[in-house]
């Protein structure tokens, strides 16, 4: 079936206006990650109200290098009143000691929404706009994994966090969201931006999340993204495993982390195939990572499709 982005936008503006009036603009906060889903959602609400709305980027310590600053700049470019909120302490505290993937996801979700609830209370607002899409709901409700942003569909009453949720694109899949973004005139940098999970690097660290591991993974992620940016993919990233391996550096034994590199192609994230990267490129990635990130002694390339694997590791 053909998707008509213009018609979708019109319908969406109408249904937002049924809930919110222009005078409500300061009652609304959009949670924005800089990804296409949350940006489209925030832009739709601002457009429906005919006024800029506040957009928060939660700096939870789980983002990539330089991400908070660059995202806020992008959001301001979209006419949103964007700001960074530092929640590193709260989020890392919530993840401390947790090793089970689902427990980590739920702890992240709870810390994330508690922080958002706090900001909304400080703002004296009552509505949270977020970019939940259909795939998030299907996978969470279907029991594949708990996506951080699926609340009401699981029967979680958001009044416990102190706000009502507005999800303008919850019936769309990624390719349709990108079409809507293009139609809204959102720049390519956002409309074509690769998906990055809500819980960020927390689900790319197998086992307990610590600041040391986050810093190691941030460096490795930067290298993997740089070295694969010309290779067509749906997502390209690094995962820090929870085991160590022996290596040798300058004739001396070292014992360091094992990193997995994952590059997949996909249409809608529901299925995915690993990308056949040339060996010389893989060798360069491995050499750069082990020399620029000395805590890592071994680099693996993940050759598993989805299914049976998922795209992320947790
Ligand atoms: P999986 O790992 O389930 O991922 O194959 C499918 C797609 O969803 C992204 N992902 C998430 N996105 N919150 C998000 O916003 C989450 O909790 C979450 N978990 C996975 C993943 O990056 C991939 O694009």
Image (tube, rainbow, N blue to C red):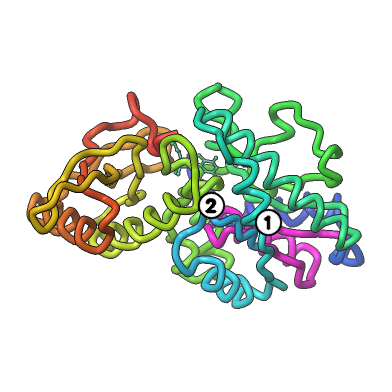
Q: Is mark 2 within 8 Å of ligand 1?
A: no
Give the percent coordinates (x, y) of residue 68: 56, 67
Decide: is 16 above or below 157. below
Decide if residue 37 is in sight here. yes
The span picked out in magenta is 27-56
Give the percent coordinates (x, y) of residue 113: 72, 45
Residue at point 63%, 50% (across, down): 131
> Label 1 to label 2, Cα distance in Å?
17 Å
Residue at point 55%, 22% (across, down): 143
Q: Which of 203 and 271 lies nearest the eye of the viewer?
A: 203
* Disc sitting over residue 177 in the figure: 2
Label 2: state its secondary structure.
Answer: helix
Q: Is mark 1 within 8 Å of ligand 1?
A: no
Snapshot quadrant of residue 40: bottom right
Label 1: state its secondary structure.
Answer: strand
Decide: is 48 above or below 245. below
**Residue designated by label 1:** 31
Residue at point 40%, 58% (across, down): 218
Decide: is 311 above or below 131. above
Disc 1 packing (10 Å; few <14; some 14–19; many ≥20): many
Decide: is 5 above or below 265. below
Residue at point 60%, 55% (across, down): 60
Check if residue 286 falls in the magenta segment: no
Horizontal relation, residue 164 to residue 88: left or right: right
Give the percent coordinates (x, y) of residue 148: 61, 39
């Amino acid at each position: 079936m053909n998707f008509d982005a213009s018609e979708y936008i019109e319908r969406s503006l109408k249904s937002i206006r049924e809930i919110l009036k222009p005078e409500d603009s300061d009652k609304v906060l959009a949670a924005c990650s800089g990804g296409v889903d949350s940006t489209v959602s925030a832009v739709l609400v601002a457009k429906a109200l005919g006024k800029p709305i506040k957009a928060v980027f939660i700096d939870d310590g789980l983002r990539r290098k330089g991400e908070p600053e660059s995202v806020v700049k992008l959001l301001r470019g979209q006419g949103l009143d964007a700001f960074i909120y530092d929640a590193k302490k709260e989020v890392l505290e919530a993840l401390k000691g947790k090793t089970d993937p689902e427990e980590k996801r739920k702890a992240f979700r709870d810390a994330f929404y508690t922080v958002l609830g706090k900001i909304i209370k400080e703002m004296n607002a009552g509505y949270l706009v977020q970019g939940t899409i259909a795939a998030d709901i299907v996978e969470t409700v279907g029991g594949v994994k708990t996506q951080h942003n699926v609340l009401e569909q699981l029967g979680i009453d958001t009044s416990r966090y102190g706000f009502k949720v507005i999800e303008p694109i919850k019936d769309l899949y990624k390719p349709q969201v990108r079409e809507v973004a293009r139609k809204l005139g959102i720049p390519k940098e956002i409309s074509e931006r690769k998906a990055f999970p809500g819980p960020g690097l927390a689900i790319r660290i197998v086992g307990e999340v610590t600041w040391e591991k986050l810093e190691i993974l941030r460096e490795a992620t930067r290298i993997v993204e740089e070295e694969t940016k010309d290779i067509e993919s749906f997502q390209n990233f690094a995962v820090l495993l929870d085991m160590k391996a022996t290596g040798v550096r300058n004739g001396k034994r070292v014992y360091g982390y094992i990193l997995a590199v994952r590059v997949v192609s996909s249409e809608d994230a529901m299925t995915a195939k690993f990308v056949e990267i040339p060996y010389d490129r893989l060798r360069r990635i491995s050499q750069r990572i082990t020399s620029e990130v000395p805590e890592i002694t071994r680099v693996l390339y993940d050759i598993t499709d989805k299914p049976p694997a998922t795209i992320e590791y947790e």
